[in-house]
């Protein structure tokens, strides 16, 4: 399944049953540079199939998932896997784009609903916690292993988080919840970091009910904004 977008099959993230069909003996499909064909290693359908295989292996093996296991699941060799993504970093970045982008879009959509801010805050916190808890192995693989092993993936994910903080700051200014932009930025980035850190903590404490942490985090978010407006 697509880790952070279960109901969005158009992004090619759905996990298919069983391993992907193997490559040709030369490791690639016919080139499509002419007549609607793609160059070797650039076939988007094959890339999607490999990412589907990676999803299955990561869901099964967690952060211990290996490139060899992913290639085997996809019915190809590791060199052919790297032919499609350049290197391990390229695969990490493709997985991050596939799964984190929909998560950010979901959070953005919840923040901009035309409802009371506390209702939006609760919906946003709930959406984030629900998605990471339901897809724990993929979340851990991306946020722990991929970011620790690859500086580009770490930089890309960090940039996504910072952009989300800036968008929240813009929202606070637009809705006049915080008057001064520096205060809005401080509050927004603190809130994003707080929710992410609290979510990480909660994943290690399954004894805490989801509704409880949603209630407490929502109150903390609203309180932080009210405090910044004072």
Image: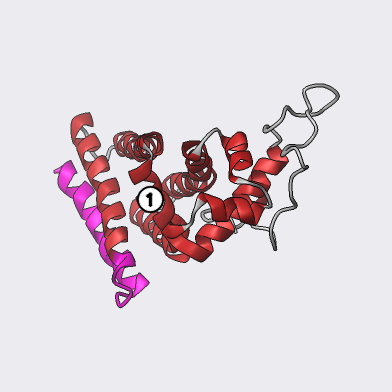
Instruction: From the top left corner, tell me how far across and down residue 215 is, in percent.
Output: 30, 66
Q: Main secondary structure of the magenta part?
A: helix
Q: Is residue 19 left or right of residue 30?
A: left
Q: Is residue 15 left or right of residue 101?
A: right
Quadrant of the frame with the N terminus: bottom right
Residue furthest right in the image: 35
Instruction: From the top left corner, tell me how far across and down residue 159 is, in percent.
Output: 36, 34
Residue 191, visible in the rendered structure = yes
Which residue is pictured at 42% across the width and 54% down the height? 141
The magenta region covers 202-230
Colour scheme of the rendered structure: secondary structure
Residue 13, visible in the rendered structure = no
Q: Give the vertical position of 221 relative to 186 (above or below).
A: below
Instruction: From the top left corner, tell me how far across and down residue 149 is, in percent.
Output: 36, 43
Residue furthest bottom in the image: 207
Which residue is pictured at 35% across the width and 71% down the height? 211
Which residue is pictured at 75% across the width and 29% down the height? 38
Q: Is residue 74 left or right of residue 35?
A: left
Which residue is pictured at 60% across the width and 50% down the height? 71
* Mark 1: secondary structure: helix
Q: Is residue 211 magenta?
A: yes
Instruction: From the top left corner, tell me how far across and down residue 82 is, in percent.
Output: 57, 38
Where, by quadrant of the figure, is residue 57 drawn?
A: bottom right
Q: Give the vertical position of 46 relative to 182 (above or below).
A: below
Residue linked to disc 1: 145
Quadrant of the frame with the C terminus: top left
Where, by quadrant of the figure, is residue 216 drawn?
A: bottom left
Residue furthest front in the image: 25
Total of numbered circles in the picture?
Answer: 1
Near mark 1 (Cα within 10 A), the count class, few <14, some 14-19 or many ≥20, is: some
């Amino acid at each position: 399944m697509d880790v952070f977008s279960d109901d969005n099959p158009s992004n090619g993230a759905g996990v298919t049953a069983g391993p992907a069909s193997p490559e040709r003996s030369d490791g690639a499909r016919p080139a499509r540079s002419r007549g609607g064909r793609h160059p070797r290693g650039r076939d988007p359908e094959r890339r999607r199939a490999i990412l589907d295989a990676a999803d299955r292996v990561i869901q099964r093996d967690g952060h211990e998932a290996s490139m060899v296991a992913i290639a085997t699941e996809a019915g190809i060799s590791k060199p052919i896997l790297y032919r499609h993504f350049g290197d391990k970093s390229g695969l990490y970045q493709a997985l991050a784009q596939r799964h984190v982008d929909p998560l950010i879009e979901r959070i953005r959509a919840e923040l901009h609903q035309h409802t009371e801010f506390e209702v939006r805050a609760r919906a946003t916190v709930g959406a984030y916690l629900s998605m990471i808890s339901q897809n724990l192995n993929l979340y851990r693989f991306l946020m722990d292993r991929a970011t620790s092993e690859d500086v580009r993936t770490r930089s890309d994910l960090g940039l996504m988080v910072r952009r989300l903080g800036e968008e929240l700051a813009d929202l606070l200014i637009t809705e006049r919840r915080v008057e001064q932009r520096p205060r809005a930025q401080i509050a927004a980035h603190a809130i994003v970091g707080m929710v992410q850190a609290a979510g990480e903590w909660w994943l290690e404490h399954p004894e805490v009910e989801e509704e409880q942490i949603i209630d407490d985090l929502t109150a903390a978010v609203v309180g932080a904004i009210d405090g910044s407006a004072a």
